[in-house]
Image: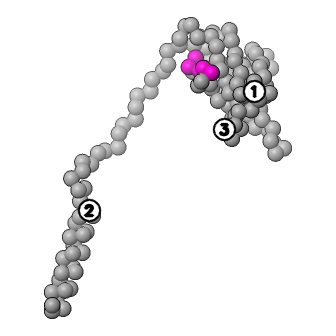
Amino acid sequence: MPRPFIIAGALLALALSLVACNSNNGLAVFNTPTAAPTVSPTANPSVTTAFVKVTASATPVPNVAVSLCTSGGCAVPANVLQQQTTNASGTVEFTALTPGTIYCFFTQSSASGSTTTYQDCTSNWQGTSTTFPLTLGT
């Protein structure tokens, strides 16, 4: 086969491959979806218990103090309402809570000579359970 035909054939094959790579192959092109609307949870008037789990590198930590505080945070001792120690599975249960109230859950971890503080202030504690506790830690 003459050389010009080989070069022309190679160029045609290259052009067809570029067209194929740049087409959408019959697939529809979609735009980026818009953000979902923000929904505020409704307080369940019958839930008065919160479950909190303390973890370190996803491992439950037993025998750690966890404080329940007012929405003002746990930095002020007067804000501490209850303090419990985690059980063998790293979980603690707080009771007698008021539905719809924002509470802060607080713990500290000392590792490698430094202290790390974990605090979560939320009204979503009403969605916690032994199966799905609020998690403090890493």
In the rendered structure, find residue 88 and report the number of the disc placed on it: 1
Q: Which residues are magenta?
A: 125-130
- Where does label 2 land, which residue? 22
Contact, CB < 8 Å: mark 3 with mark 1? no
Judge whether 80 appears above or below 14 on screen: above
Instruction: Please name the amino acid that badge 3 sits on.
Output: Ala
Instruction: Please name the amino acid that badge 2 sits on.
Output: Asn
Residue drawn at x 69%, y 18% is 93
* Whole-number angstrom distance, CA of label 1 to CA of label 2: 58 Å
Q: Secondary structure at mark 1?
A: loop
Counting the numbered discs, the total is: 3
Instruction: Please name the amino acid that badge 1 sits on.
Output: Ala
Of callouts 2 and 3, the N-terminal one: 2
Instruction: State the image coordinates of residue 39 (x, y, percent, origin top left).
Output: 45, 23
Crowd rating for badge 3 (residues with CA inside 10 Å; few <14, some 14–19, many 20+): few
- Where does label 3 land, which residue? 58
Which is in the foreground here, disc 1 or disc 2? 1
Dividing the picture into quadrants, the one containing residue 133 is: top right
Check the image and name the residue furthest to the right: 113
* Residue 129 lies in the magenta-colored region: yes
Is residue 73 at least partly visible in the picture?
no
Residue drawn at x 22%, y 66% is 19
Contact, CB < 8 Å: mark 1 with mark 2? no
Instruction: State the image coordinates of residue 85 (x, y, percent, origin top left).
Output: 78, 22
Q: Is residue 109 left or right of residue 121?
A: right
Q: Quadrant of the N terminus?
A: bottom left
In the rendered structure, find residue 79 and report the number of the disc placed on it: none
Instruction: State the image coordinates of residue 138 (x, y, percent, origin top left).
Output: 67, 38
* Whole-number angstrom distance, CA of label 2 to CA of label 3: 44 Å
